[in-house]
Image (cartoon, coloured by chain):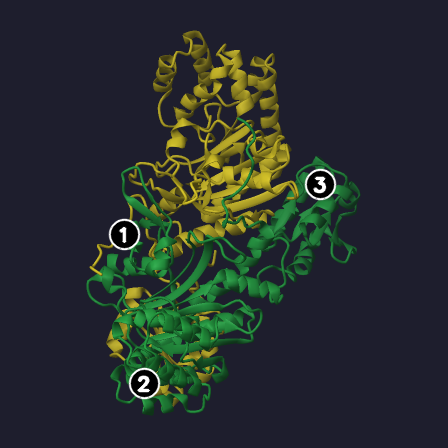
Chain colours: A green, B yellow
Amino acid sequence: MAEIVPQIPKGFRDFLPQKLIYRQRVMETIRKCFESFGFEPLETPTLEYAETLEGKYGQEGEKLIYKFEDKGGRKLALRYDLTIPLSRVVGMYPELVKPFKRYQISPVWRADKPQKGRFREFWQCDVDIVGTRSILADAEIVCIIFTVLKKLGFENFTIKVNNRKLLNGIVIWGGIDEKRTADFLRSLDKLSQFDAETVQKELRDKGFPETALSRFFRMLEDCKDSSNLLSRLKAQLSTIPSAAEGIRELEELFQYLGNYSIPSQQVIFDLSLARGLDYYTGIIHETVVEEPKIGSITGGGRYDNLIGLFFGSDVPATGASFGLERICTVMEELSMLPPCATSTQVLFTLFNHDLLRTILSLATQLRSSGINAEVYLQEDRLKKQLGYANSKGIPWVIIIGPDELQKGIFVLRNMGRGDQEEIPLSRIDEAVRRIGTCARGQS
Amino acid sequence: MAEIVPQIPKGFRDFLPQKLIYRQRVMETIRKCFESFGFEPLETPTLEYAETLEGKYGQEGEKLIYKFEDKGGRKLALRYDLTIPLSRVVGMYPELVKPFKRYQISPVWRADKPQKGRFREFWQCDVDIVGTRSILADAEIVCIIFTVLKKLGFENFTIKVNNRKLLNGIVIWGGIDEKRTADFLRSLDKLSQFDAETVQKELRDKGFPETALSRFFRMLEDCKDSSNLLSRLKAQLSTIPSAAEGIRELEELFQYLGNYSIPSQQVIFDLSLARGLDYYTGIIHETVVEEPKIGSITGGGRYDNLIGLFFGSDVPATGASFGLERICTVMEELSMLPPCATSTQVLFTLFNHDLLRTILSLATQLRSSGINAEVYLQEDRLKKQLGYANSKGIPWVIIIGPDELQKGIFVLRNMGRGDQEEIPLSRIDEAVRRIGTCARGQS
């Protein structure tokens, strides 16, 4: 066989150890936090029937689904998100006890144009509660977002909250054709990226009536004064049932968030928040960080009608999705998690094979104390073996030659500081203590 | 939108929480063991260019690769195993420090005929050492297989070992056309499933000469007497350099395995072991369990020429692959790991919303002590809430109503035993201690 140029498709990535260890630590923190709130893991297949995914993600999303035919002529599709598979699962296993609280951390695929920070294969971390209309469920989701981000070390973030019922009510109040609500909200969603004038122009170009638009944007302007905002809106929109209900739900949400002891400045009501997807029906939310400018790092909300597509009757649901790629980007840029060059904590050098039994026995002892211990696998000059530890970033080296063996000691060398000490062979616990202090994944 | 029948493609699976938690515990044990030997994680993309995978898996394997064209007309393929992507990675990043010791635990896809225990999407756990010809590396791989299986609780397993160099030598010794070695070994590999006569007949039908076959099978028969087997073979095959080298490597391997303190009856030399894939070049191995009958649960060996396809020059490598599906099947059938219904350890019942602040504060305390604590999300009869905990398999429930709050206590109920006790609100640490004793993933 001829030599092949080693390459991978555009928009796809290899995660080499150092990068992957970092991501695994982030995912582990997220996973543990989800479980601490009583969420259980779920895993759905990579491939779904294409018809399961089709017609769910809007016109733009539809184009990005990876689809192909299997040999039997069935159309298959790569997972596009984690919400539709969850809905399919709830429909397929009616025996699942409700409320069903699950999380899933998995890659999804989108045939998007690859560009900086945008990939065709990327990870989502989703947490959802299926089977209750209780606003306490929405509050718990917001609390989880807050708790996960705090655990990861985020400080300057804001969770923006709104309610689709309120937005739908405003559409009615503004005199906008209700059938065009989704289209209106898709433009409105761009307010996080563009200024009000740009969005207003887009809406005007789409043919929304000028009177409605100016009425709506005047209301948005009024909202900049946040004092008693919900009460003021309640008075203004009292005749629109949908708006009134949306406001009532938001009030209930904020009351619960107080019980969760979440600082009120970190969860704010933002009437301009719309969320892009059509399927939301109630409370919606999104998290932004001040620095770096990167867009939202979480998004989600209530979707009470989506699962009904698979279940026959409506099953209420609410949840959030964490964008692992953006979260890792922010954490790296702000050096929020000290990078960890390798998961290996100590390297045993190999002087000659006669020492193997001693070395392997010590390595086994370290391993059973939870230390990741590598043994150098061939005889080489000590300098080369230390160079190997250095270039891999292994923080400690244990050296045992014939002299050390005779003296009944081993040498423990700290590669960062360059110093070393002699420890009796019988005191391997000393080495465990020293090495263990810089263990991986303390979070 | 009309209701859709919720279903998934044949050969694919949803992992609902209970099943997935079990698998995660198994994978976590494997992962930790890999890392304890100084192996680092690697993750490669789900999709590779088809040409990366083509021509590597033999005629039969080739047909099972999932392939499709992207919109740019490039042929893509779903990952078929973890060895070819590793080889591609080594070729693509020459800066990787050698020996490169990596593990990868990922799904792979094969368009195989779905049948009991065989899936189109299944998980492999691979561990490989790239960049050294040292037989100590092969010994370490065998030691890792032994250690992982012991950690998982396996007792009655045998790691069978052979060497492709020895087999190649025997092919020459038997007077078989060397060009047909791969074909010969593919048939030989069936000795683990069929008796010698059946395999001999297949070889005869393939046109291998009768004299060579009877000579070879007589040698196999002689091998049933395992005393001094390697020495006897060494004498018999002394004139065939390849065989002599293979035997020398095996002797070196067994010497190292002694240093690793692996019981000699659990790693045996088996001349009939051939392994199906063409790319092996040296020591090969495979693990079988006595009960249940399920085929091998690990397989692997040395492949010194494969990476050269991507690298230009040869890079030696050796490794093993653990079959997660079979391992989980055996563990379930033999009840080796107590099943764990849920990752949630305790449920707080909700009597009314006035108690929320107290409940949420206690739940937060439990969570920060590492307990997975769920709060029931709506007011319901106590019986219904206890029924929920029961049907989910949550082992503990904490009950706080207005009476308990007034008395300054909460009730901790053990759902399995059905008994309960009153604990002062200030002694949440008591609850942590009781609940913590049955934590998940103690392994």
- At 50% across and 68% down in the image, what residue appears? A295
Q: Residue at x 52, y 44 (%)?
A: B147
Q: Verify CB contact (< 8 Å) between mark 3 and mark 2.
A: no
Q: Residue at x 76, y 48 (%)?
A: A408
- Dot 3 falls on a residue whose secondary structure is loop
Q: How many other residues sit within 10 Å of disc 1, few (<14), some (14-19) or many (≥20)? A: some
Q: Position of residue B151 (x, y in %)?
A: 49, 48
User: What residue is disc 3 on?
Assistant: A350
**Earlier sequence position, callout 3 versus callout 1:** 1
Tell me where residue A7 sits by quadrant. Answer: top right
Identify the chain of the residue marked 3, using the numbered disc in the image: A
Residue A147, position as x, y percentages in the image = 48, 73
Q: Earlier in the sequence, mark 2 or mark 1?
A: 1
- For the residues beneath circles 3 and 1, the answer to whether they share a chain is yes
Q: Are marks 2 and 1 in contact (CB under 8 Å)?
A: no
Residue B266 appears in the rendering? yes
- Decide which of A100, B380 is in the foreground and name it: A100
Which residue does the numbered mark 2 point to in the structure image?
A248
SS label for mark 2: helix
